[in-house]
Amino acid sequence: MSVNELYTKYTRVWIPDPEEVWKAAEIIKDYKEGDPILHLKLEDESTIEYAINPKTNQLPFLRNPDILVGENDLTALSYLHEPAVLHNLKVRFLESNHIYTYCGIVLVAINPYEQMSIYGEDVIYAYSGQNMGDMDPHIFAVAEEAYKQMARDEKNQSIIVSGESGAGKTVSAKYAMRYFATVGGSASETNVEEKVLASSPIMEAIGNAKTTRNDNSSRFGKYIEIGFDRHFHIIGANMRTYLLEKSRVVFQAEEERNYHIFYQLCASAKLPEFKDLALNSAEDFFYTTQGGNIYIDGVDDAEDFEKTRHAFTLLGVKEAHQISIFKIIASILHLGNVEVRAERDGDSCSISKEDDHLNHFCELLGVEHDQMEHWLCHRKLVTTAETYVKTMSMQQAVNARNALAKHIYAQLFKWIVEHINKALHTTSKQHSFIGVLDIYGFETFEFNSFEQFCINYANEKLQQQFNSHVFKLEQEEYMKEQIPWTLIDFCDNQPCIDLIEAKLGVLDLLDEECKVPKGTDQNWAQKLYDRHSNSLHFQKPRMSNTSFIIIHFADKVEYQCDGFLEKNRDTVYEEHISILKASKFQLVADLFHDGKDPVPATSTTKTSKINVRSAKQIPKVPNKDHRKTVGHQFRNSLSLLMETLNATTPHYVRCIKPNDEKLSFSFDPSRAVQQLRACGVLETIRISAAGYPSRWTYPDFFNRYRVLMKKKEIVLSDKKLTCKNLLENLVKDPDKFQFGRTKIFFRAGQVAYLEKLRADKFRFACIMIQKSVRGWLQKVKYRKIKKAAMTMQRYGRGYLARRLADQLRKTRAAIVFQKQYRMLRVRRAYLKIRNATITIQAYARGMFVRQLYHEFLLHHKAMVIQKYARGWMERKKFKRARNAAVVIQCSYRRLQARRELKQRKIEARSAEHFKKLNVGMENKIVQLQRKVDEQSKEYKSLNEQLSVANTAYSVEVEKMRKELEQYRGKKGEGNQISSLQEEVQRLQTKLNKAQAEKKQLEDIYYTEKEDLLKRLADLEEENALLKHDKEEMNQRILSQSKDSEDQVTSKTLKESQQKAELDDERARYQNLLKEYSRLEQRYDNLQEETSLSRFHLGHRRNPSNQSSLGSDSNYPSITSEIGDTEDTLQQVEDMGMEKAAMDITVFLKLQKRVRDLEQERRRQQIDLEKMEELAKRKGNEDKNTADPDHDTDSAYNSLKRQELESENKKLKNDLNELRKAIVDRATQNNSSNELQDSYNVLLNQLKSANEELDVRKEEVLNLRTQIVSCSQQKEPITPIETKKMPDWSNSNKHMNRDDAIEAYQGICETNKLLEAQLQSQSRQYEDEMEALRTQIEVFRDEIERKQELLSQTLQLSPEAQVEYSVQQEITRLTNENLDLKEMVEKLQKNEKKLKRQLKIYMKKVHELEAAEPAVQPERRRHELTRQATVQRKEKDFEGMLEYYKEDENLLVKNLVTDMKPQVVSATVPCLPAYILFMCIRHADYMNDDQKVHSLLTSTINAIKKVLKKHNDDIEMTSFWLANTSRLLHCLKQYSGDEAFMTQNTAKQNEHCLKNFDLAEYRQVLSDLSIQIYQQLIKVAEGILQPMIVSAMLENESIPSLSGVKPMGYRKRSSSMVDGENSYSLEAVIRQLNAFHATMCDHGLDPEIIQQVFKQLFYMISAVTLNNLLLRKDVCSWSTGMQLRYNISQLEEWLRGKNLQQSGAVGTMEPLIQAAQLLQVKKKTTEDARAICSLCTSLSTQQIVKILNLYTPLNEFEERVTVSFIRNIQGQLQGRNDPQQLLLDFKHTFPVLFPYTPSALSLETLHIPASLNLDFLTRV
């Protein structure tokens, strides 16, 4: 474009101005090339003639279009120059109150001098995870960019914060560190991030001071490295400081202060702990009053001092060290008040001995008063031959005193920094770090000295690094986009750096002059003139010979040479250092030690002015560090800093001070331009402008400028080609743009030109639209008048017609009313007569039916009474005979039990004696383990022998069958049976012998197990003793640590010894724990072996289910009460332990015996059922075959009879022995009535068990009768009598081989049954192993946790270790105490419950005996002969599921752990919950509280594990939320509470729980449901959150509504991933549909679903509104329209899912009002009132923020004026709104689980086979 095209009429330009730097103007006459004058009009309507230099022909800078003003990024401006940058910053700062602006990779921060609420945690979380450029500029965005690049590239990062004093560097660095502390918080409990933040108050107190430019100016530079681990959590930090301004300690300029810590300490001087410091107000000390004002407005020094002390404590600085630090600081104040008096000769001086301040100084530092007094007025001169002591003048002494004060403060500052680094140091390996550099900016004053020289030198180095980095990024961008790269000329300040730091540079000459004995500042200045007079960056002032000028990158600076040498030397006399090294306070001495042995100071007398000493003493070599000059040290530290920065990826923050008066939101353009030049921002602009600063993606460019092309030129399939064609037509110069791979690059000014063309196009279109609209309006007006006339006519005619119609309608209505009334009156009379007739008939018929019913009822009751009376008489007769036999048996068994008891008492006493003799516990445990191993091996060998015997027995049986075949041919049938019986008896005897041996081995094993349990108890006692010793040792260590202040050396030694002893005790204790766990594991292994060995070889007794009287009734049988005896025995055992001191051995045996009896009964029950099934199957197979021989059947029955007799005898002996033992013990403790009652209950139960054994005996007798009757049958040929009982007597045929094979097959079937039993025991063993593995995992987690605690404890100081160990021990003992209390309460409840249940059971037994029907002898005999085939009677299903205790793990595994929602998707919703509740119902029905407790606990734990494993699976979480809530509702619905039974059916009320109140478990399930609900919300929010911003704000739901605004580096973050996903509203709705479908499929309650979507819609609203409040690019009218459309779509979705009553729409009210705010008019006062009444859900801060961010998309829209925003603020001033800007998107509404009973009947529930729940039995 030519100049004639750009500088035309109405074009706006910038012209220089002396006051405002740049002033806006408008061209009023077209400029032609070569014209000497440009005609302009200013903003105040005045005109000027702007002269153009004919040599340079420099025209004024062009202004950017209004649409670009206020951009977030300065590089997005079309015209990039100084006035455009300054104006953009001014508009953003003053009009929008935005303090942050991007300038490429630099964040420009303007100090607002006002507290702003944009740094809360809500803002941190809003920026977390966002790309740089997506949100408004912020220090958090820079910090997030550094954090993401560190995580992605695994490269260290740096944030460089620079600026003038008062620009806000320290605050910016502090907020960056706060961001890292919040986002990258430590994973452990060490709270490293809090320590990092706590270092800021300390460093501000000791390193910050009030200056004329800043109330809290940092007088040093610092670089903080924040270390991260591999998971990018903060693990530590390190701080480096640079160039502390020590001169401020002794001198302050007017209106300035010393360091804050001095004033804080004086403000707190009246505290009791600071009485020894002898401090008063800061006005009383010379070092704090030179500035004139000791106060800062709005600052409370005492309050800040408390914060400083708290920070010291948080960083681990002990109270004693803190006091020592404050003593040193107070001593510096006293030193400044020491009065030095000149002597008469003027060459010497003195200090009064009564000087209080010197006394306080010496006391606080612990140094000799006389020595300090002497050496403050004298100095020592050391030569090679002699040492001289020379007096000093008063000025020299004052200088020495000030130098000492500066040195003391500098050393203390260094010590504090080192201590902070130690506190922030970590032993973990650092994976990466982010450094935050807070360093002084470029400084230039009227008087510039050595400090300004070093500061500007550092800024020269940083500027060089900044220039190279910006240049590198520009080059990478061009190469990435594959466009031609041309070299860009940028300012290289390497010559200036060489001038300062090169060989014989300024610093070298300064160090050389400092080495000269009589070097002066004038001589050094002369050397500079001679050496560098020809340098381009060095100048000599015309009017001065003691100053020089250096031309820096930012400005020329004149430095005065006075004081350079003294400040560079930083001289402190060695005599003063030696006195301080000899301090009696360790901290003071440590400050000045150089790592070598100190040389004691020598005292001198001042008899004369000059004393000559002997030269025999070798002069002390000065410290090497003291020989290094300040300049040399600063250069080295700066080089190290630059190496660190060059090794990291830098991020830049440039802080700008808007004015020198510290006024809030006041902008001084001249000061701002000066700083922009100094900090390099304009250099960044210049580099960008030299290339292609404006960059557009092809889609954005197409959407913005498609209006400039014709429709036929648009190729939608190839937007890149369309953009190329458009640019080639509009911009003729090809150098003005470049086509990259994904972007179009423009030279400066081209975007403004395209905007001008676009505006012209729109202006022409607007004129055309206006013409058409005005014509349309006139047509509409005419049509409206015509329509009004026609309407009036129509309404008049209509009125007349309606009046006639109304008259006709009223007449007809009167007739209808008369007809209806007459009909109603007649009908009522008829209905009254009819109802009376029906009532009379009903009562008469009912009377006749009731009479007939009563007759039938009386007849039926008579029959029932006869039946029960006859039954009772028969049972009474039977019980009388049975009781007589029981009495005889009991007498004999009692005699045997007493003998056995006496023998066992002897054995118990000998065992007790043996236990006392055993002292060596560890050796005994090893011996016991070996003995148990040997017995296990012996036990296995005996099992093998038994298996061999069983095999031999099978072979013998087969042989006998063969012999039986031969024998039948010779002898009769009677002899065959007898011989076979004898042989079977012989084999049975062998088998009994083997079983007896096995029984003996089991007894030995149980004895050994009891001994092992006793050993474990002893180990636990010793463990408790060790814990007690440990506590005493901890108390001893704690008491010794309190007295350790006076004995520093001995204290360290004692602490190390005590720590070693403590470690030994811990090691010993841990070894005992390991030994205890090993023994527990050994005990579990032995128990598993025992469970495997319970499988007995050979045949077992096979009792019938019908042997118990009334087994089909609803009352429990006698044998069922034996199972309850275990709980009763446990109750008696507890009572005996507390009251009667009974022998525990008897009760253990009793408990074990009864448990074995119950297990034996259950096992025989299972065997019987399996044998019945086998017999039935066998009978079906042999229906059509020949009848088997009766002899083999008799043999089988004989074997069964003998086995039953032997087992019966063994059980009978055991019970007699137990009863005898209990009777003996009961007689010895008759004094306790309560205990006697317990014995009576137990004896009654044992009597019941004895009766059960008698029944078993009766079964044996009946079986024997069957065998005898079969043997007497000798008919040669008989038909088959019955099909159910096979008989081997088949006519006269002899037994052949087929019959023997059939008998052998019967034995094989028996073996199969035994094998099935073995498999069931194997499954039980596997379940126990799984439980043990789970327990091992729990123990392993516990060990890891304790190891972690131990490692953390070892990192603490010894005192903290002791305190921590004591606290941990107290916590552990408290938890154990609470557990014991809970256990006692549980046992007491269990005891009461068992007593109540025993009474109930006894009552039921008596009722059963009284109501038992009489059975005829013939009927009983018939039943006994057929009992092997009688089947259990089928009963109605009561909605319960029965399972065995050993199947509980399998039940939980199939229903919870391995359950997949897809498996039960086609069944009843919440099927697992119903099945679990039916199992709970059965356990409640059986009154088994342990089973209920175990099942509920296992289920809850399994659900927690499943949810933990699938913590990000929305389907699994929804599934278990539905099932958990349904289980909770079932427990409520069937609890029996009337409040929950109102909606139940009668059948459901019958299914209520009978025995247990599960209210506590309902509370646990309610808590679990809340946890699952929260997890569901978390998972759903995690899925939705990445989609919200893109779908709600960025995606165009209404196509072509929003135009694309010109932008610069939008979405330019280097941490972005290419091809980032964008989501539409349809994707969000699809996801919501998926959530809703999933929850509905799983049967989740509708109320819960409503609460879920209320929470999700709140999160959508909060995230969208927060992004709207932090993004300027989306605050426009078109975005408001898109937002309104999106919200309406969401509301439509809620209505479609019937969720409009959930309150979800109410949560979106703030977002709805924000969208409306973007669309309403924003001009007049009425508009402001409308906005205030509209936006009731938005806070004042949010409304103002949106108005400030509102940005028009084109020039036809007007910006929101500042006056309008002020008007809004004024009208909203009375509101009591929260100060928080953003909504808390993590806020969770409280969830409510309403009670929703189920209409499903439990008895109708079907369990699919796919669940593998075959072991459940329907009851």
Image: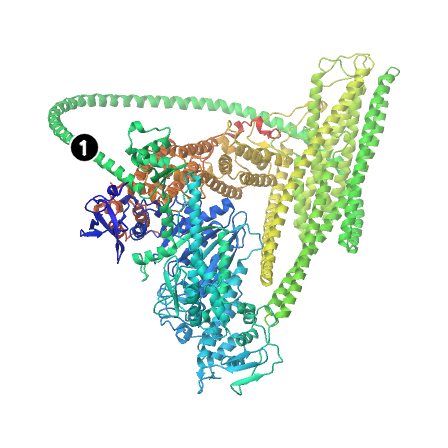
What's the residue at 55%, 50% (across, down)? 431
In the rendered image, is residue 668 in sight? no
In this view, the residue in front, 1528 or 1347, is 1347
Side of 1282 where 112 appears, left or right? left
Total numbered circles:
1
Q: Amino acid at mark 1?
A: Val
Does 168 appear above or below 394? Answer: above
Does 359 appear above or below 984? Answer: below
In this view, the residue in front, 1201 or 1667, is 1667
Residue 1294 in percent (x, y) is at 83, 14
In this view, the residue in front, 280 or 463, is 463
In the rendered image, is residue 1768 in sight? yes
What's the residue at 68%, 40% (across, down)? 1245
Q: Which residue is mark 1?
A: 773
Of the 4 image quadrants, the one containing the C terminus is: top right
Residue 1620 in percent (x, y) is at 44, 37
Q: Quadrant of residue 484?
A: top left
Does 1049 appear above or below 111? Answer: below
Does 64 appear above or below 1371? Answer: above
In this view, the residue in front, 1175 or 76, is 76
Of the 4 image quadrants, the one containing the N terminus is: top left
Side of 331 where 1779 appears, left or right? left
Residue 91 in percent (x, y) is at 29, 51
